Amino acid sequence: MIEEVQALMIAYVTDGREGNQPAQYQSLYVDLDLELEGLGYANPNPHKSLEVFWGFCKLKEMGTWADRRAYVRELYGDVLLDLERHIRRARDPRHWETANAQLTDNLSPVRAQWLKAKNFIYSQPPDYENSIKESINSIESILKILLNAPKGTLGKILPRADIDSDISRLISQAYGLLSNKDFVRHGGVIDQGITETEAEFFLEFAAISIIYIKHKLSASTPH
């Protein structure tokens, strides 16, 4: 289904446009969106129609067919990589499924970030530094959404969260640790000796933090 969606997108913005493609795309888009949700993935494709996608290409000045093809291929890259891992029966981190289940509805955008954090560990070659970055950023992202602070940073908005002070301090220390690591936030080139063990530690730490924050902040939000 992903391949069919990608083929329609590429054809529409290159040299293969046909009149029946928009209707085919919209029907397939809905089916794929439901399928991905059932498998625990956020749909990484924000373009709900081919006309909208064509407008996006013009807005982003993707003037060449090669640029448009590359964008479409990259769009589902993380989902396809993770599906391939499951086909090969690769294990998931311990708290992955539970944390992923928290990232629904308005938190769906964090799912894509969360998936990227995992994929950085298990891709070939692995990228442990960026996995750690995305893990901690996923905590920041869920706080931004639940506290309605889209432009905030974890350090500034965390004190506003109604969570245990000791847990808040742990999250803040993790964020501060990464801020002091050149490899994560400042484009450092010195080898920090980061391994899969550290990357998995932060992925699990982020998972537990997401589960806790969603429970605490959702419970404290008036209905």
Image: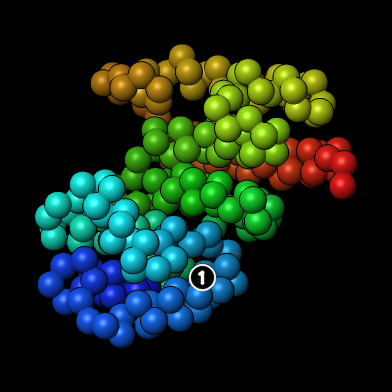
Seen in the picture, residue 135 relative to 72 is either above or below; the reply is above
Q: Name the residue rendered at 16%, 77% in the picture.
A: 16
Question: 213 or 15: nearer the eye?
Answer: 15
Q: Tell me where residue 27 sits by quadrant.
A: bottom left
Residue 202: tell me if it is visible: no
Question: 168 or 189: nearer the eye?
Answer: 168
* Residue under numbered circle 1: 33
Amino acid at the residue labelled 1 = Asp
Q: Secondary structure at mark 1?
A: helix
Seen in the picture, residue 201 relative to 151 is either above or below; the reply is below
Seen in the picture, residue 99 relative to 28 is either above or below; the reply is above
Q: Name the residue rendered at 64%, 39% in the picture.
A: 145
| Residue at the outermost top position | 180
Residue 130: tell me if it is visible: yes
Q: How busy is the neighbourhood of tag 1: few (under 14 within 10 Å), some, or many (20 plus)?
A: some
Q: Position of residue 126 (x, y in %)?
A: 34, 45
Q: Tell me where residue 128 sits by quadrant.
A: top left
Question: 11 or 126: nearer the eye?
Answer: 11
Q: Position of residue 194 (x, y in %)?
A: 40, 30
Q: Name the residue rendered at 20%, 61% in the picture.
A: 69
Quarter in which the N terminus is drawn: bottom left
- The answer to whether 29 appears left or right of 204 in the picture is left
Question: 218 or 39: nearer the eye?
Answer: 218
